[in-house]
Structure formats: C-alpha cells, structure tokens
Amino acid sequence: MMQQQPHGVAPDLAQLQSTMHAIELACSSIQMHTNSAAAEATLLSLNQSTRPYKLCQFILDNSQVANARFQAASAIRDAAMREWSSLTGDDKKGLIGFCLCYVMQRASSPEGYVQAKVSSVAAQLMKRGWLEFTVAEKETFLHQVNQAIIGIHGIDVQFSGINFLESLVSEFSPSTSSAMGLPREFHEQCRKSLELHYLKTFYCWAKDAAVSVSARISESGTKVPEVKVCTGSLRLMLQILNWEFQPNVTSAKAGINVFSPGVRSDLTASKRSDCNVAQPGAAWRDALISSGHVGWIVSFYAALREKFSTGRYWLDCPVAVSARKLIVQFCSLAGTVFLSGDEHMQQNHLLQLLSGIIHWIDPPDAIAQAIESGRSESEVLDGCRALLAIATVVNPILFDHLLKSIRPFGTLTLLSNLMSEVIKVQMTKRSDDETWSWEARDILLDTWTALLMPVDTSAGNTMLPLDGINAAANLFALIAESELKSASASALDEDDGDDYLQASISSMDERLISYALIGRAAVNVTIPLLTRLFSERVALLHQGRGIMDPTPTLEELYSLLLIIGHILADEPEGETPLIPNSIQSDFADTVETQNHPVVILSVSIIKFAEQSLNPEMRAAVFSPRLMEGKSILDIIVRVSVTTLLSYPGEKNLQALTCFQLLHALVRRRHICSSLVLLDSWRALARAFTNEEALFLLNSVNQRSLAQTLVLSASGIKNSESANQYVRDLMGHATKYLIELSNKSDLKIISQRPDVILPLSCLLERLRGAARASEPRTQRALCEMGFSIMTPVLVLLEVYKNESTVIYMLLKCVVDWVDGQIAYLESRETAAVVEFSIRLLQLYSSHNIGKISISLSSNLISEANTEKYKDLRALLQLLSSFCSKDLVDFSLDSDESQSTNIAQVVYLGMHIVNPLISLELLKYPKLCHDVSSNNFIQKHIDVLASLKLISSFIWQYFALLSHMLEVYPETVGRLDSEAFLHVLGTLDFGLHHQDTEIVNMCLRSLKALAAYHYKETTSGNLGLGSHATPVKDPRGDMQDGVLSRFLRLLLQLLLFEDYSPDLVSPAADALFPLILCEQGLYQKLANELIERQVNPSFKSRLSSAFHMVTNANQLSCNLDRMNYQRFRKNVNAFLVEVRGFLRTV
C-alpha cells in the first residue's frame, strides 16, 4: 500500500524513489504476468491515494518505465477529479501547468501513448475547472499552447500543441467527453462557452499551422517531419467542423435544457447517410469563406496529388486522407455562414471545391479501370461522399448548374455517368464479396435520394432540369439491366451466399426506394421501359413452354415486379398505397385512360397474374416456381426423418434438422396446413412417439422437435382435431411419467440409467410441447400439465439429490405454467397455485442450508451452479404468476372466485427466501488462485457460471421490484420476518455493483414511500407498524423502514460512488421519503450542516438543503411535474455540495 503523506508535508527523496520503484515493479509484473494480484493492488493503492501529486510528478519526471509514467498520469487525473473541491486554485492551475509543460518538454518522446495520456489529463483538468477559471487564467494556459502551435519551439512541440487541442475539443464535445460524475448542465455550459469564445480561435491556429508547413511539404515530399504537423492540423480542423454547432449561441448559459437528448432537429431530415452537415454560423464566415482558406486546401491537395501521382499508395497516406476528408466536410457547409442576401456566395464556395474534386471522379471509366488495375479506391469514394455532401445542402437545380461553368455537362450528368460506371463494374465482376463498387453505389444512391426526396412530402415531386431527366433515364435503364442480369444469374446459383437472394430486407428496400426516385425523375421514359421489359419476359415464358427452364425468367419477373411496385406506389402511413405526385402530374396530357402508360403497365401485370388460373400455364410455367409446395415439403420431411433415424451419431446434422430445418417449416400456418396432410409428416409423428433412435437426441433437439410437432397442429382447421393430435403426440410422455411415479420400487430403480435416460428425454419433450402453447391447442396442453402434477411431486421427492433431474422437473413446470396461466379459469388457477406452492415447499425442505458460496473455494462448484439454476427456475415460476394480472384470456366473470396473485407470489417468495442468502446475491470472484495451472482450462466454465449467476440475481431483483411496485399494499400485511427479509434485500441491492439492480431497488423504494405517503394523507395506515420506530431487545429505538432508507439514500447520494445514471431514480425515491419523514430529513440536514468547520461550506450546505425542497415551485403532490422539479433540484444540490462533502 502507498504510504499517505500528511497534508502539506512533502515526502523525502528516498521515499519518492522507493515508491517509484514499487510502481515500476508492479507495472513490470503485470506485463510479465507474475504476481499480478499484488501488482494490481499496488497500482490500485496509487490511484486511491490522497493527494499523490508530488509522487506522480516525480514518477513522470524520473521513471524509465513508460507504463509507470502512464499509471502516474492516470492517478493524477483520478485524484484531482475526486478531490477537486478541496484543492486550492493554485493547486488546480499547477496540475494543469505541469501536464502541459511535461507534454511540451518531452514532445520528441518515443512513448506516444504516455504523451497522449498526459495531454488527455491536462484537457480533462482544464475542462473540470473551466467554469471556475477567469478569462485571464484560461488565456495563460492557451497562450502556452498557441506558442507551441506557432512552431517557435520546433516541429515536435508544434505537433504536441495540436494534439493537446484535439484532446481539449474532444473533452468539450458531448459525444466524446469523459465522465466526471457531474450533471449534464455542467458539460453543456462548458460546450457553449468553448463554442462561443474559443472554438474558432483553435480552428485558426490549426489552419495557420497547416499553412506554415505546406510549402515545405510541397517542395520536399511526404517524408519530411512537417507532414505530421500538417496531418494533425488538418485532423483538428475536421474535428472542429464536425462539432455539433448549436444555432443562435449568444450566451454561455442561455437556454440550456439539461434533459434534452442533444439531437439537432433541423438536421434530422438531412441525415439519410453518414453526411454531417456543418452549420457554424455567421461568426465563422471570415475564417471559412472570406479568408480564401478553401482555395488553399484544394490547391494544396492538387499540388501534392500531381507531384506524387506515380506513387500508387500515396492516396492512402495520412496527409492525403486528412486533406480529402476536410475538403468533403467543406462541401457540407450550410446556414448563416453564407450571407443570406448573397445567393452566389455558397455557389462560388461549392464551385471552388468541385473544381478540385472533379479530378478525383472524372472521367469515370478511366478511374474505374485504374482501380481495377490496382490503384487505391479511397479517392474516388471520397469524391462520391463530396457529391453526397453537396446534394445534401443544395437543391437539384443548383446542384446540376455547379459543373456547367467548367465542363460541357452538368453535375447530374456526371453523377449519372459515375454511377453507371460503378454499376458496369458490378455487372462485369459479379462477386459475393463487397468491393469498392458496392460502397460507391450505396453512396451515390444516397446522393440521388438526397436530391430527389423532398423534405416536405406534401410539396410535390422534385423537378430536374432536362439534362438531369435524361441522365436519370439513362441511369435507370442501366439499373434495370443490372438487376435483371443479377436476378437471372441468381436462379442458377446453388449456394446461399448470393447478395441478390440473401440481402437483408431493409437494405434491399432502401435500394429499391432510391431506384424508384430515379425512375420517377424520368417517369415518361421509365414507365414505358418497364412495360417493354415486363412484356418481353412474359412473352419469353410463353415461347419457352416445355422447351426451356422458366426459372431465370421468373426470377427476372420477380425483380421487375419489386421495382415496378416501388415506382408506382409509395409506402403508406395507413393501409392504402399512395400514388406518387410524379405519376399523377407527369402524364397530364394523356386523355384516354386506356392509353395511360401506368394503366398499360398495370394491366399487363394483372393479365400475367390471371394466367396462373389457366391449368396449362399453371402446369407448364408456374409449377416450378409457385405450385410445387407440397412436393417440396414432402421431400424435406422425408429427408429429415431419414437424417434423424439413420444418422444417430451426427450431432450437428441432427441439430440442423431439428432446430433450423423442421422448426422453420411451422412458422407459417398455411405451410402447416399442408404439412399435417403429408404421409411423411405423420410418419415423423409416429417415429417421435415410438422410435428408440429419437430418444437419443440431446435435450435441445428433443425440445425443438416436440415444439415443432405441436406447433404444426395450427394447420388443422378443426379445433377438437387439433387438440386430439396433440394428445396423441404427447400421450406417451404423460403415460410414462404417471406409470413411473406409481411404481412401488421407484426409489430402488430410480438411479438406473435405463430409467433416468427416458425420464430426462420425456421431460424435455414436455418442455418443448409446453413452449408451443397457443389458443387452438391450449386445452390439450392444459390437460397434459394437470395429468403430471402428482407425478412431478413424487419424482421431486425421489430425485432430491439428483440435481439434473430436479432442474428438468422445475423447468418443465415453469414452461407449462408460463404458457398456460393466461388461459386458466379461476378453479384451474387455484389448482395450479396449490400445486406450485407444494412444489416450492418440497424443494425448500430438501435444500435449506445446502446452497452457499462458502462451501467451495471458487465459483466452479458444480453443485452451487445447479442450485443457482434451480433458484432461477423457481423465480421464473413466480414471475409467471405475475402475468396473470396483466394478461388474462380466461372466460371467468366471477371475480370473487379469482386467486389473489399478489398473496400467492409473496407466499412463494417467503418459501424460497430462506434458500437465498445475501451471499448468493453477490458476484463472486472468478478464482482465488490466479496462477493455477487449471485457470486457463476452466475460464470458459467460469464465464458461463457468471452469466448464470447474473441471470439469477437479475431475475430475483426484477421479481421483487415488480411486486413492490405493483402490489405495495400487500407489503404492509407481511409478517415481521418476511418484511425484514425484503428490507434486507433492498438494502443490499442499493449497494450492488450492477446499476440496473440498484435502479430496480430505487424504483421499489419510490413505490413503497409513495404508497405510504398517499395512504397516510388519506387517513389510512399505509405500511402501518413497519413504518414506525420500535424498540429493540436492548431497549434502543430503531428507525422505521422509511426513516432507515432516508438515511441510507442520503448517505449514498452525498458520500458514496455511483453511476450518474442513478441520480434521477434516486431523486424519485428520495422525494416521497422526505415527504413521509420531513422531521428526520430536517434533523439530518441540520446535523450535517453543524459538522462543517469551514463557514463557507456551512453556508453553502445550508442554502443547498433549502433549495432541494423549495426551489422550482416544488409542492407536496406526488405528480409527474413535481418529480421533474425535484430531480432538477437534486442535480443542482449535488453539483453544489457533493465535492466538498466527500473531502472534508
């Protein structure tokens, strides 16, 4: 452990050196994997030390071990954040100054990660004190950084200064800032302050640094050291332009919404792709537009591009990539950065950019050929992204006009030619692997979508100039050709990897939507084209009847129908497809309805569909694609039966058959209707009940096969026949359990393998059948469960020491209750409840005292793992009963006969609770002996056990939280023992390491306190005696439950570590607790105030406590508005006092 130094007493040199050597040794031990536990303890001690700054600075200045310096920097950060309120102003500035000096003085150090860490620490400390420091103090630090960036101290220092600004901007950006345990309001104020006063300055520093070294790079090459300065500067400029600029920022504190999600609604419609629109505002006009900076970056990249054009890999070097990304980001500038009255300013800006970008993407055929010959595709992809950025900020008319001043064609023609070339590459090189052409196609489709999809759909279709319409028509014709070629080729593919067949639905829909927009842009051309293509394929089907395989043609027709459907109709908000505006308006001159191009196309599709009614056409054309369903199903089932019966040792093949192939067949009811009529399916059902080979399937496959066979009953139209099918299917399982449980020598034969094996198999089948519950077959499955209730209890007694069988019995009951409880009538529910309580009591009587972490040296205790599984199953059983009050399909109308679910669940928890100690609710350590030779071999089992335990713990707290939130009135009627167990669990849960568990406990506290407050204000007892103080056996007064948790929650909020996400739920619980115990709250506040020695702290604490219960017009009503007000008060309270309370 690190020795703590008294405040104000500096450690001597010998002690500093001794401690430094200990840290170095710990870092080396961790790297060498020797004595890791002791090494970790040493580093943890360093991080938790009080005021370790002198020691850490000594290590940074003197240690030769890079990891030790890294740990020292990390310790400075952690300690400063922890002790910030108690540090003096000079201390704070001294730490920042030290970090900055360290980075600058060791700028040439080869350990870049240490430099980056210290730079990050300096940025975080500067942000932490940002709202405290005066303008002059900030300027002092930033002047030091500026001097470095100017370059007067050399290239390495210049680069370090730029890197620091990257860290600083990253810390102030909401999406990349580090957690500091402070409310969002603090981060928002810092962000606004930086944006308003410093962000543009940083940008100008980076711009000047890049310009200052650009000549040297252009003259010498990309190997000179100035390249890293230029690359870093360009990267910082891009980072700043990607800043989430807020409109109308006039004050660092104005208009902060602490609870807003931080999404800019003005750009939501624009974000159809990865294009980030930049709107820095009018204040940035001089730096971005008027300064000629855009011309410089375009010229700089063009000069380097020309100089290094022979270098195949130059396009991917860091300076080239950074320069292109910055140029692309410049394309997305929008808003008031351009003069509102000067319509040419943005146009000239984009033209200047496009003049440089055009060389990246034109001529498309030559560039595509170069890429196919080995040239990097990164430049052309960035060119595509630049077109997308421009399309996002301008309308189609301006977009097309931009290029006409420097080329004989418009930008839309270039866009069409570029995408056409990309599609040609895809058609030529048809591959399953996603190549550059795939990415280029998607970016260019997004570009068309940005141009053609109106933000306001009610405003009509987006009009294109004539050249643009012709470009769209030519492109659409090539798209149609490409899709038809891909569809035809896919019909001959034997594998499942083809993109056309296996593309995700969402991805295919997005592509079709873009195709439709392009097609509608030239609808006078594309509709007749689609009509011709469709008619040609239909004619080809007729010509090839009986001569050629129609499958490729049918695939082409399917592809055409998808495209036609998207062009002719928009996705509706209701049930009726919407006719696009372009379809309605572009054929206005067509007088006769029968001659309307859309009508002609639609009629041809309808007539094609009518041909399926013709027996000859159905047999000759439609049979291979549409009419062979039953024969294919019969083949699949026959192959499945053969696989399961003839290949008993092929586990993977059996899993594929049971879990994927057969299970997929019963997902559609119309397929089930065909399945149950097949002889092969009936043969599978008979084999399931009679064939011994199927008893050898593993447990997962048993469950899956049983579930599949029961689900197929949904295809039987008659309900009684469907239920009889299930009875016949599962009768062998229930009969075996009943007969086995009635054997007089059951205890003697129970351990024989020929008894346990079929028992295990049939229990898994019953579980699978129970999981297939649905209304049509519910009655048969209900009877199945009731028939095995008594056998289950008998078997639970007999196999009490056989953990595997016990778990299968419990899970069988859980799955059946979960599937049936919503359908049971009152009498049936009561019977199930009685059975479940008997089961819980029986299990509890056999297992009390047997479940303990302490019984094993580590987590990998098989017995304990099985007990966790059992307890989780019991909790799932109780949770299933909770759903009865939420979802109830029973026909009972007499509520007087209904079961009180809350009482049942609390009774069940009371039975189970003795099995669950607080020790079981902890996350145990992985292994005590880290150096054990078996550790590596066991780690998979350990992780699996941890997952199981985590699931059990979550299940327990979720059930408890649900009960306390939904049935708080029942808590007051619990006896003292049960109530104390609930309280002890909540107390433990509030200090759990899992944030979600703490959150559930806080919601439970909120529900209990709110219930008590509302009941007592109405003159009722609420929690009754549980909420009043009582005397313990020694005569001392003990707090009631609400007083106890009020103390605990205040202690947690003020003095303990927790996730910032818990502040709001903790405030929600604290509010009703204070209302219930106002006297105690005032007493605790006064005690804490009086303990403060510092008069300033005492005054601040007094004001803060007053603010909690009086600010923002807070009242005593537990409504939504008051909860929101109290959350805001608590956030402000914690910001004000938590820092100094934890250090005094």
Image: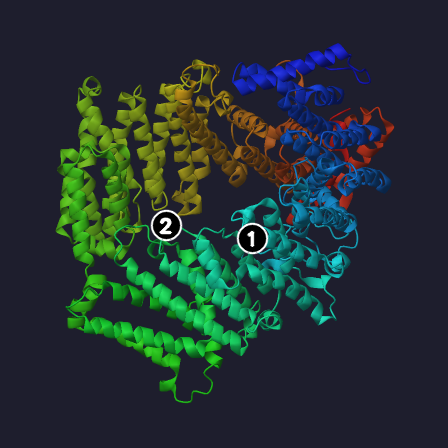
1093 in relation to 1103, above or below: above
- Colour style of the rendered protein structure: rainbow
- Which dot marks residue 309? 1
Is residue 1111 or residue 412 the one in the foreground? 412
Amino acid carrying label 1: it is Ser
Asked if marks 1 and 2 touch (Cβ < 8 Å), the reply is no
Is residue 1054 toward the left or the right of residue 871 in the image? right
Q: Quadrant of residue 20?
A: top right
Amino acid carrying label 2: it is Phe
Q: Residue at x 24, y 55 (%)?
A: 671
Q: Is residue 728 visible?
A: no
Q: Quadrant of residue 624?
A: bottom left
Determine which residue is flagged by label 2.
Answer: 889
Is residue 617 or residue 729 the one in the foreground? 617
Is residue 631 or residue 388 the one in the foreground? 388
User: Is label 2 in a helix, a strand or a loop?
Assistant: loop
Q: Residue at x 21, y 50 (%)?
A: 722
Q: Position of residue 222 (x, y in %)?
A: 62, 44
Mark 2 Cα shell of 10 Å, populated few (<14), some (14-19), many (≥20): few
Is residue 124 or residue 745 the one in the foreground? 124
Q: Position of residue 197 (x, y in %)?
A: 79, 49
Looking at the figure, which quarter contains the C terminus?
top right
Is residue 498 toward the left or the right of residue 512 in the image? left
Mark 1 Cα shell of 10 Å, populated few (<14), some (14-19), many (≥20): few
Q: Position of residue 1133 (x, y in %)?
A: 74, 37
Going from the N terminus, do you reach mark 1 or mark 2 first? 1
Q: Quadrant of residue 160?
A: top right
Q: CA distance from mark 1 to mark 2?
A: 74 Å
Is residue 292 toward the left or the right of residue 554 in the image? right
User: Is label 1 in a helix, a strand or a loop?
Assistant: loop
Q: Is residue 535 visible?
A: yes
Q: Position of residue 126 (x, y in %)?
A: 75, 36
